[in-house]
Image (cartoon, rainbow, N blue to C red):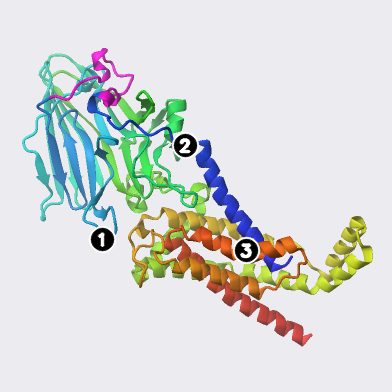
Amino acid sequence: MESQRNLLIVGLLFVSFLLYTEWQTAQNPVPQQIEQNLTKNAIANTDVPASSNATVQGQGIVTAQQNSQLVTVSTDLIKLTIDTLGGDIVESELLEYPVELNGVENLRLLEQQQNFTFVAQSGLVGANGPDAIKRPTYQVSQTNYVLGAGENTLEVVLTYTDANGVIFDKVFSFARNTYNVKVGYRINNASAQNIQVQMYGQLKQSVDKPTEESSMMMQLYRGGAYSTENEVYKKYDFGDMEDDNLKQITNGGWVSMIQHYFVTAWVPNSEHENVLYSRMFGDDKDIGVIGFKGESLTIAANSTGELSAILFTGPKLQDRLEALSPTLKRTVDYGFLWWLATPLHWLISFFYGLVGNWGVAIMLLTFAVRGAMFPLTKKQYTSMAKMRKLQPKMAALKERFGDDRQKMGQATMELYKKEKVNPLGGCLPLLLQMPIFLGLFWMLQESVELRHAPFMLWIDDLSALDPYYVLPLLMGASMFLMSKMQPSMSTDPMQQKMMQFMPVIFTVFFLWFPSGLVLYWVVSNVVTLIQQTIIFKQIENEDAKK
C-alpha cells in the first residue's frame, strides 16, 4: 500500500466530508426570503405563548401603543434596548465585537429592522398574567442607564399596575464583565384575591437574514437549539419548527437561537419544571419562535412573589456558557466529535495563555498533535516502505499468474504472510488520524477566539480568508513535496493522474478556508515532511545494517 494511495484516501475522505455537509444543507433548505415590509403589527401574534389563557384579543394581536418608549442600557460589554411595550429586549449590541475588523460599527445580535427581526421577549401569562390579555406598557423613571466606572451592578426597573391594583415590577439586573441579563418579576398582589401567573421567555427571529453568507466550505448554522434533562443538546432549525411544534417538559433546560460564533439563550430556573416550545408564523412561515414557560406561581392576596430567568446574548465563550448551564457550552457546535474537539480547544487555549497569539497557539497545537500521533505516523510509513520492497516480487507474481485472479490473490497473501507485512498497515493508522483532523477542523471553525484575531505580517484575522492566498499556496506546495518524497510504485495511470492533481484540488478548496484552518494544515504538512525524512532515513540505515 504505497503512500500515494493513502494520500488519495485522505483527499477522498476530506472531499466526501465537505460534500456530506453540503448534502445536509440541501436536505434542509432555508425557506424563501421574508417579505421586505414586515411591520410590528404583522408579527405581533408571536408575542405570547399560544396556550396562554387569553381571549381572541389576548392572543397578542395588538398594536403598538403611542406612549411606549425605548430604554437603552449600557454596561462594559453590551448595550441593550428595551421596549416598554411588553418589556421586550429588541436590540443587543456587543461593544467588544465590531462587525468588521477595526470597524466602528458594533455587532448586533438582537435587532428589529424592516426586513429582519430578532428579539428576546418575556412576560407573565396564566389566569392573572398581564401579558395574557394584551402586552402591558410599563412605566420607567428614565430612558438611559449606564453602568458607571465604579459600579459592578445595575438594576433597571419597569413598573405596571393592572386594573385590580396588582403591581408588576419587571427588573433587569446587569453585572460588570458579563453578557448575562437577569430578567425577573417582583409582584405585589395588593388585591383582595389570590392571583396566578406563569413566566415565559422566547426568542423570535426571521427565517432569512439578508446579510448571511454560507458556502460549501463553511456551512454556517443559524436557528434554534435546546436542552432538556434527557437531551443534552439538540438543534431545532426553522424547518423542524415548520414540520412540528416543539413541546418538551423538563426540569431546568434552556432554549436558544445560535449562529456562527454567537448565541442568544433563555436559561430558566433549573429547579423548576419548564415547558419548551416552538412555533412558526407568517403567511410564508417566515418567523420562528422558540421559548419556555415556567411553573405557575400562586400569590396570595396582600403578599408578594418573584419569578426570574437568565438571558445570555453574546459570544460563544465556553467558560461563560458553562457557568450558566453545564450543557449550554454545547452550542459551540463541534458536531459528533465534540468529545474530541473540546480537549483540543482546552489545549489551544492553554497555549494561547502562554504565548498571547492565537496563530502561534495553532502552531503549538499542531506540534503537539503531530507529536502525539508520531507512533502512528511511523507505523504508517514503515508499512509503506515494506510494501515498496515487495513491489518487484509482486510484479513477478503478476507475470507468473497473469489474469488468474484467484491464484494471484492466494500467492499475494502467502507473500504477505512470509514477509510479515500487513497490507492495511499503512491505511489503518491513517484512518485513526481522520477523527483528529475533523475534530480540529470543527474546533478551529467554531472558536470565536479566532474572530478578528491577528497572527503576523499580512494575516490580521485568523477567521478570514488569506487576502493574498499565500497560506493555501504553501499548503499546496507542501502537499506536492510530500507526494514527491513518496515515489509511486503504481502502474495505474488513473491513480497517477489523480495523485498529480490532488495538491491542486486541495489548494482550490483551501482558498476559501479561514486562514487559521489553513495555517494548521500548512504547519501539519511541514511537520509531516520532517517526520517522513526522519523515518525514511531510519529505515535506510536499518536496511544498510542488514
SS for tag 2? Answer: loop
Disc 1 is placed on an element classified as loop
Q: Residues within 10 Å of mark 3 (few under 14, many from 20)?
A: few
The residues bearing labels 3 and 1 have C-alpha atoms spaced at a distance of 39 Å
Residue 5 visible in the shown view: no
Residue span colored magenta: 42-65
Front residue of 235/37: it is 37
Q: Seen from this angle, which residue lies furthest bottom?
A: 545
User: From the viewer's perspective, is the residue at label 2 or at label 3 nearer?
Assistant: 3
Where is residue 509 shown, x and y percent of the image?
52, 58
How far is disc 2 from disc 1 in space, using C-alphas? 40 Å
What amino acid is found at the position of numbered circle 3 in the picture? Phe
Amino acid type at image mark 1: Asn
For marks 2 and 3 on the same chain, the one whose residue lies earlier in the sequence: 2
Q: Which residue is mark 1?
A: 102
Residue 61 point in image, percent of width and height = 25, 19
Instruction: Name the residue tied to disc 3.
Output: 501
Any mark on residue 231, and which?
2
Q: Amino acid at mark 2?
A: Glu
